[in-house]
Image (cartoon, rainbow, N blue to C red):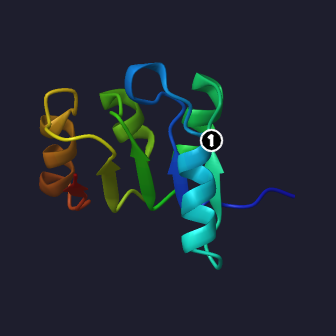
């Protein structure tokens, strides 16, 4: 039996930093929320399909497309240079709103 993640933490951290402490902090702060750290590209693709919140440095446009329930992408670093803003905005025209927070 699989559990749907409420928050998916993407595998890549800023400048190679590990994302495990970030995922652990989210679990501590949101104890009633299922937080899952994706450790491989395959896990990212599988987990993002049902997640409502995704967080990380960036999210690839193909992952945005695969994220059918995505409501929020929370970037863990300042700026939008490495974020597919167009792909996230395109969801609006498809009736699938997604907020971008950083």
Q: Is residue 101 above or below residue 41?
A: below
Q: Residue furthest right?
A: 1
Q: Is residue 96 above or below residue 17?
A: below
Task: Label 1, secondary structure: give it.
Answer: helix
Image-based side of 96 in relation to 38, left or right:
left
In the rendered image, which quarter contains the N terminus? Answer: bottom right
Left or right? Give the position of 48 relative to 74.
right
Nearest the eye: 95 or 60: 60
| Residue at the farthest bottom position | 32
Rendering coords of residue 38 (x, y %):
62, 37
Q: Nearer the viewer, residue 15 or 60?
A: 15
Choose top left, top right, bottom left or bottom right for residue 87. top left
* Mark 1 neighbour class, 10 Å CA radius: few under 14, some 14 to 19, many 20 or more: some
**Observer able to see residue 68:** no
Which residue is identified by label 1? Answer: 20
Q: Residue at x 74, y 61 (%)?
A: 3
- Asked whether 20 or 3 is in front, the reply is 20
Residue drawn at (39%, 20%) of the image: 15
| Residue 64 visible, this angle | yes
Pinpoint residue 55: horizontal percent, then vertical percent: 41, 48
């Amino acid at each position: 039996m699989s559990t749907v993640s409420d928050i998916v933490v993407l595998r890549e951290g800023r400048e190679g930093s590990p994302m495990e402490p970030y995922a652990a902090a989210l679990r501590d702060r949101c104890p009633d929320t299922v937080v899952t750290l994706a450790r491989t590209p395959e896990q990212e693709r599988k987990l993002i399909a049902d997640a409502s919140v995704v967080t990380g440095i960036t999210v690839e446009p193909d992952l945005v497309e695969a994220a059918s329930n995505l409501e929020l992408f929370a970037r863990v670093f300042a700026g939008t240079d490495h974020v597919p803003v167009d792909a996230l905005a395109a969801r609006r025209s498809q009736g699938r709103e997604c907020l971008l927070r950083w």
